[in-house]
């Protein structure tokens, strides 16, 4: 077998990844939802994290409760997304003429984003996320102001929302509800990055998700109910349907809606609750964009002050040099 001496080659034999088990005296308890049905989880959003990109943003939903000590298996999954915007930049000369901005969205899970390791090539779910995101953003960007230009929105999901509890094991299949929360986070992060890049938009678009759960499946007395921002690990197979929307609050418009599952007679209620969740997220989005603009204004004022002080110092040194070079009059004896 030929070996490439210029690369770090893998070991010739197979390797077994380590498996971390909990101590024998430790009892794992499934996390339960302690929030109200109409309460959203706390989230973090910041713009301007990648200086080399035209615009960038970081979106995170951290775990709402601390991790118990002595456990290596996380009890609750979190969501971490980075977004970068490259453009607007001119199209290649051999490209066809376009009177509007050509917007493209690229969504990719990091290999370590989920419990099951992801590949380096985009799969069908990632391409589906990119198509939904591109549809949501096309209704926001004013493409007529950027003819013959292109813009790329690249999102990397560092940690995704899991479809099941981590301790259930690989034999338990999830319902695919975590990807709905991922899409809502991608929409919000992309909106913040577009504003940070200075691309004209009609409004801020925020993503919101709601779900219909059936607590009666496990002997509960609540029956069907609609909850905002569902976490699949908190609902043991209770989620029956979910809906994610891309909402423009000031225009009262929905640019993207994706519904999955059987909502029954609660379809309209599910959509209204998803819009309500997007309205709650928009408050955080507006504050993050405002902080980013103020930071840019502050940096511009500091640069202007430094430039002015440099020019002033240069003039003073020249004036001092001129005074030094002047002849010194001698005193009469």
Image (cartoon, rainbow, N blue to C red):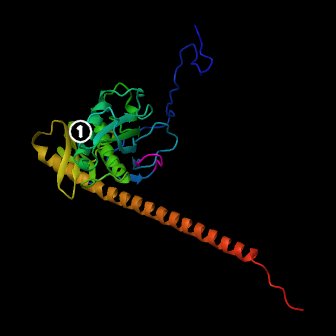
Q: Secondary structure under badge 1?
A: strand
Question: Measuring 36% from the left and 57% from the top, which residue is drawn there?
Answer: 289
Q: Is residue 191 left or right of residue 222?
A: right
Numbered disc total? 1
* Percent of width and height locating residue 39: 28, 54
Q: List the residue tagged with mark 1.
A: 239
Near-viewer residue (209 or 157): 157
Q: Main secondary structure of the magenta part?
A: loop
Residue 221 visible in the snapshot: no
Quarter holding residue 307: bottom right
Magenta span contains residue 97 = no
Q: Which residues are magenta?
A: 49-57
User: Is 178 positioned to the left or the right of 47 in the image?
Assistant: left
Name which residue lies at 37% across and 44% down: 87
Q: Indicate the quadrant containing the N terminus: top left, top right, bottom left or bottom right.
A: top right
Where is residue 22 drawn, in percent x and y? Answer: 49, 34
């Amino acid at each position: 077998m030929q070996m490439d001496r210029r690369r770090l080659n893998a070991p010739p034999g197979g390797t077994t990844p380590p498996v971390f088990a909990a101590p024998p005296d430790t009892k794992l308890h499934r996390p339960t939802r302690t929030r109200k049905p109409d309460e959203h989880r706390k989230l973090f959003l910041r713009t301007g994290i990648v200086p080399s990109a035209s615009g960038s943003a970081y979106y995170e939903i951290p775990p709402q409760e601390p991790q118990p000590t002595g456990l290596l298996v996380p009890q609750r999954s979190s969501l971490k997304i980075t977004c970068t915007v490259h453009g607007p930049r001119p199209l290649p000369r051999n490209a066809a003429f376009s009177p509007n901005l050509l917007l493209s969205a690229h969504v990719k899970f990091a290999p370590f984003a989920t419990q099951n390791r992801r590949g380096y090539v985009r799969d069908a779910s990632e391409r589906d996320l990119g198509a939904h995101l591109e549809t949501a953003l096309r209704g926001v960007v004013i493409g007529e102001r950027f003819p013959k230009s292109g813009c790329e929105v690249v999102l990397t999901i560092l940690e995704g929302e899991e479809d099941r509890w981590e301790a259930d094991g690989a034999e338990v299949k999830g319902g695919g509800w975590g990807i709905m929360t991922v899409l809502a986070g991608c929409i919000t992060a992309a909106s913040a990055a577009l504003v940070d890049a200075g691309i004209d938009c009609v409004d801020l678009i925020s993503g919101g998700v709601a779900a219909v759960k059936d607590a009666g499946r496990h002997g509960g007395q609540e029956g069907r109910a609609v909850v905002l921002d569902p976490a699949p690990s908190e609902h043991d197979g209770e989620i029956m349907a979910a809906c994610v929307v891309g909402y423009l609050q000031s225009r009262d418009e929905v640019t993207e809606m994706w519904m999955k599952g059987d909502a029954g007679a609660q379809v309209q209620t599910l959509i209204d609750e998803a819009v309500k969740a997007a309205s709650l997220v928009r408050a955080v989005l507006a504050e993050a964009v405002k902080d980013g603009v103020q930071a840019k204004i502050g940096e511009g004022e500091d640069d202007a002050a430094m430039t002015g002080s440099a020019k002033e110092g240069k003039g003073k040194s020249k004036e001092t040099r001129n005074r030094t070079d002047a002849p010194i009059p001698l005193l009469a004896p």
